[in-house]
Amino acid sequence: MTLTPYLIVAALLFAIGLGIALTRRNAILVLIGIELMLNAANLNLIAFWRFGPHPELMTGMLFALFSIAVAAAEASVGLGLVIAWYRHSKTTDLDEMARMKG
Amino acid sequence: MMEGFIFGLLAILTLVGALAAAVLRNLVHCALSLSVTFVGLALMYLSLGAQFVGLSQILVYIGAVAILVVFAILLTRGAGALTPHRLIAAAGWRLGWIASVAVGFVLIFALVRSPLPASGDQAAKVTVLQIGQALMGPYVLPLEVVAILLTVALIGAVIVAMPEDQKEMR
């Protein structure tokens, strides 16, 4: 196995995540799309760690670990915001979240 | 050969899960296909020799994030009957898909054209002991920053999601 197939899978995953984040109406699904994009970045980090010149330094792997932790924090705060907004206005539809529209 | 077959299987699993999350109508089905994608990615990490990251992926994403997403969907009553198609896609969804397909094409084009290192014959063996020593040694500052970040995010999420009348009682 070489590096390129893993990077292609990561690129496709990133494109799908971007598509979800740009096209779905539900705020929770937009968060899912952002999680998929973060996971694509993690796959890149792990693949470059495995096939890079110095895998014994573990740089990419530890970066991926920290990235997973940050993604978990992001998911919890994002879903908390969605639930707070739902309690306020009884919808999770992003097209109806236009209160600050000028 | 065997490795390539397993990789192909995992890639198909991951991408089909992600695509299903993109097009399915029922939000709970989207969350379940999202966890399929997470499983595929975790198995890919395991096959790349990053056991600790793969198990962390299972623990954090499947054990926590997917469950959190399902809870959020059920709390916001998103798991109703089938919605009409115009209700699942945002206003400019055609433009959104065009943009994301273009991004994917540009990324793959750049990947195929660029010279990448072909090394990786040596199977790097990283033990949990080495990871722990690295986390307590050169990476101790980022570890502490992540610990503070997680604490702040936990408290912030609780404060944000707390009902307004309970905030007044403090």
Image: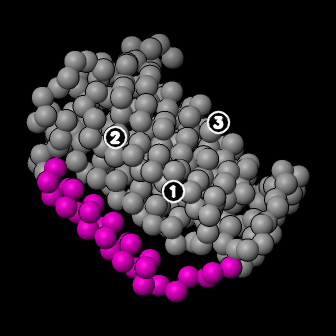
The residue identified by callout 2 is B20
Number of numbered tags placed on the structure image: 3
The residue identified by callout 3 is B59
In primary-sequence order, the first of circles 3 and 1 is 1
In primary-sequence order, the first of circles 1 and 2 is 1
Instruction: Give the amino acid type for the residue marked by disc 1 in the picture.
Output: Gly
Residue A4 in sight: yes
Disc 2 crowd, CA 10 A, few/some/many (<14, 14-19, 20+): some
Nearest the viewer among B45 and A42 is: B45
Residue A57 in sight: no
The residue identified by callout 1 is B8
Magenta stretch encompasses residue B109: yes
Report x, y in % for residue A81.
38, 33
Query: To which chain does the residue with label 2 belong?
Result: B
Residue sitting at 17 percent across and 26 percent down? B83
Instruction: Give the amino acid type for the residue marked by disc 3 in the picture.
Output: Leu
Residue sitting at 46 percent across and 61 percent down? A9
Query: How far apart in space, not on screen, are marks 1 and 2 (Cα)?
Result: 18 Å
Stretch of the chain drawn in magenta: B93-119
In primary-sequence order, the first of circles 3 and 2 is 2
Quadrant holding the N terminus of chain A: bottom right
Q: For marks 3 and 2, give the one nearer the viewer.
A: 2
Nearest the viewer among B19 and A90 is: B19
Report x, y in % for residue B18.
39, 46
Callout 1 and callout 2 share a chain: yes
In-image side of B125 versus B39 (left or right): right
